[in-house]
Amino acid sequence: MSMRFTTKARRGMVVLTAAATLAVGVAGCSGGGDDDKKPKASASAPQGGGSDPSAQDNQSQEPLVELKGPDGLLLQITSAQRDTGGFVTVNGNLKNDSDKTLTLPAQLSGNETEVIRNGRSLGGATLIDGTGKKRYYVLRDTDGRPLTTTGITSIKSGVSVPVFMQFPAPPDETTEVSFQLPMFASGTIQISG
């Protein structure tokens, strides 16, 4: 599938990717990630400000939906925002509700060789437009890296890590989609914007 983006949209995706990766790095420093490994950045971005939500914003929002995963993992989706660049950004928190440190299953990255080659991610996530009968996969950058949170290998008990995923936007009239992530229950979310 070939997708073309304007320079402005591409820069916006890179900035969002870098901001989310930074947020995961900060969460990892506070005990959320693997103590011996740092999350890998999924893209580089120019220095500068942006209007990206912070990790604390994700954690304080009321979830749109909570999806149960294996071994006490819980994905709380806090927003699904349609952006002017032709994509949808889904934000949330991946929480360890168990009483032990959990290693994230490799299946969350999906089964596409190009995505798996770039390390652990949430690249297996999809949006389903039931009305339009289409499935939307996580976007990739020009090097094949998924535009989603990457590098989380484990989460300590009781810790929430902010996550994001970017997808091509369904048609404007589609405001409700089903969100799916391997090994998690699926759920219906509303797209705003």
Image (spheres, helix red, strand yellow):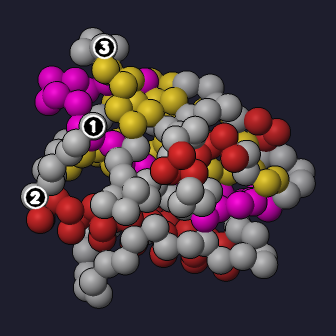
Hey, what amino acid is under mark 2?
Thr
Q: Using the numbered discs, state the Cα–Cα distance from disc 1 to disc 2 in whole angstroms.
A: 17 Å
Q: Residue at x 79, y 54 (%)?
A: 103
Q: Using the numbered discs, state the Cα–Cα distance from disc 2 to disc 3 in whole angstroms.
A: 26 Å
Q: Earlier in the sequence, mark 1 or mark 3?
A: 1
The percent coordinates of residue 166 (x first, y second) are: 36, 48
Q: Earlier in the sequence, mark 1 or mark 2?
A: 1
Q: Using the numbered discs, state the Cα–Cα distance from disc 1 to disc 3 in whole angstroms.
A: 17 Å
Q: Which residue is mark 1?
A: 1
Is 108 located above or below residue 151 in the figure?
Answer: above
SS category of the residue bearing label 3 = loop
Q: Residue at x 60, y 72 (%)?
A: 39
User: In front here: 114 or 12?
Assistant: 114
Q: Which residue is mark 3?
A: 133
The percent coordinates of residue 154 (x first, y second) are: 75, 60
Is 108 located above or below residue 144 in the figure?
Answer: above
Name the quadrant of the C terminus. top left
Decide: few, some or many residues near mark 1? Use Cα within 10 Å; few <14, some 14-19, many ≥20: few
Q: Quadrant of residue 134?
A: top left
Q: Earlier in the sequence, mark 2 or mark 3?
A: 2
Is 186 located above or below residue 94 in the figure?
Answer: above
Decide: few, some or many residues near mark 3? Use Cα within 10 Å; few <14, some 14-19, many ≥20: few
SS category of the residue bearing label 1 = loop
Say whether residue 165 is left or right of residue 31: left
Q: Which residue is mark 2?
A: 6
Instruction: State whether residue 79 appears in this view.
Output: no
